[in-house]
Amino acid sequence: MSTELFNQTIAQLADELASGKITSVELTQAVIARTQAVDERVKAFNSFDAADALAQAAASDARRTAGQALGPLDGIPIGIKDVIAVTGQPLTASSKMLANFVSPYDATVTQKLKKAGAVIWGRLNLDEFAMGSSTENSAFHTTRNPYNLDCVPGGSSGGSAAALAAGEAIATLGSDTGGSIRQPAALCNVVGLKPTYGLVSRFGLIAFASSLDQIGPFNRTVEDAAITLQAIAGYDENDSTSVKVEIPDYRAALKEKKGPWRIGIPKEYFGEGLDPEVAAAVEKAIEFYKSLGCEIKPVSLPHTEYGVGVYYIIATAECSSNLSRYDGIRYGHRSADAKDIVDLYYKSRAEGFGPEVKRRIILGTYVLSSGYYDAYYLRAQKVRTLIRQDFLNAYNEVDAIITPTTPTPAFKRGAKADPLAMYLCDVYTIGVNLAGLPGISVPCGFSSSGLPIGMQLIGQPFKEADLLAIAHAYDSKHDWSRKTPNL
Ligand code: GLN
């Protein structure tokens, strides 16, 4: 276990900052130096602005000296996925389309982190427009898994997961449409939380599939996830799907809520295709919950098998609409050699988008076209309702559901060239987005080849406090998530 500043948790660093043992400038310098030392190999960042981060850190230290420290995030460097807007910083979605775009405004989550005193640090790589499961779809470069540089970090928030695992940030933000926080968290040995749809504002998040997208944190512990969620959750009038709910004290809930809980095991998530080492690690975690006195119950989510199909109809339909704004006229890449307006639209999009984005726009346009709308899109919406109902039925009997986060540990770069093989990386995470539920991936072991394994806990809508408490009961008694890679 490393005692380096850049590998510590928010909870530890907040105490050290509060007691005056360290300053935010020292901490931020340590993170910058670490990034400069390892990012050539990990490639988690699209860009970073060290001078800007140090200026924020100095402002944090000045607040503290004046007796006006803001809370546990004050002075903590937090990396941001390059689809979340930060004023004056690049916002590229890892696409040629936005390669030169600088954001004129802050996302709501960015503003909230700034209000909590966090040092906003760096722009983290992703699959182009958050479409993918390996970060290989980035138009700029492929991020590496810090536990094995030949393997992928997962995706689409691969940069956010890898940067945190490698000590290049103290926490990071990502976005999750079908698994893009939980899957890379599992593959990189960090905690990843996808909140209930509507809990965290999407204002300032580049839209992929608006009915599924949700921003959430990557952390080293579940306690840190509670601290980070506290800062970013809450109603926002700038997001019409944001929900007005009371925000409890998530960190206090970790201590107050003690169980024992009723935990459901869906047999549909433990079948064919599941790597035996992953299954064994999750089963050990289940045994641990049993030892706490939790009631472990089989539950059934009978429509699980339709999840991936339904997701790739709804997500592509929504992305084909959301991405129509990139037309070469208003902002983004504009082709230099178009002969007329139609040619300008055509060439700008042909040059600006990569192959996976184009594949999805074409598929989404197809499922929405007249004649196919009822057969595909409308039917997918109906099955989506059934999938949500499966979960709600299960919650009549259990408080939470436990599953593997991913079917396998991290795979080699280039191993999933077939798009369908890549799509199946999210079989266990997609249902949570379709149902709008909260889900968290927590490290729970390593494979025989030294690659991290994660388990997923799925909670009830807006009951993040319970979900975090259940996850913390395991995480606080295991130190998987405190191991660090050899870089
Ligand atoms: N891997 C899934 C996809 O490619 C999910 C991506 C995400 O959650 N943003 O769509």
Image (tube, rainbow, N blue to C red):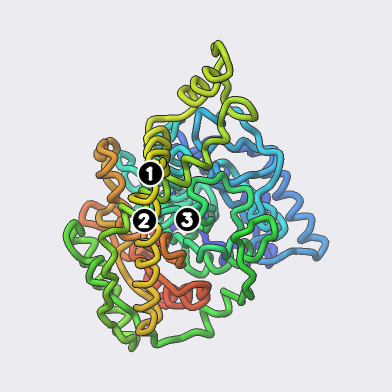
- Using the rendered image of the protein, determine whether residue 452 is visible from the camera's viewpoint: no
Instruction: Determine which quarter of the picture holds residue 185.
Output: bottom left
Q: CA distance from mark 1 to mark 2?
A: 10 Å
Residue at image point 54% right, 20% down: 342
> Whole-percent x and y of residue 330?
65, 29
Instruction: Determine which quarter of the picture holds residue 442.
Output: bottom left
Tell me: 62 left or right of 245: right
Q: Amino acid at mark 2?
A: Ala
Q: Tell me the residue that label 1 is attached to.
A: 367
1 or 3: tag closer to the N-terminus? 3
Q: Tell me the residue that label 3 is attached to.
A: 212
- Label 3 beta carbon less than 8 Å to ligand 1: yes
How packed mark 1 is, by other alpha carbons closer than 10 Å (few <14, some 14-19, many 20 or more), is many
- Label 1 beta carbon less than 8 Å to ligand 1: no
Q: Is residue 347 above or below residue 257?
A: above
Q: Tell me the residue that label 2 is attached to.
A: 380
How packed mark 2 is, by other alpha carbons closer than 10 Å (few <14, some 14-19, many 20 or more), is many
> Whole-percent x and y of residue 450?
26, 53
Q: Amino acid at mark 1?
A: Val
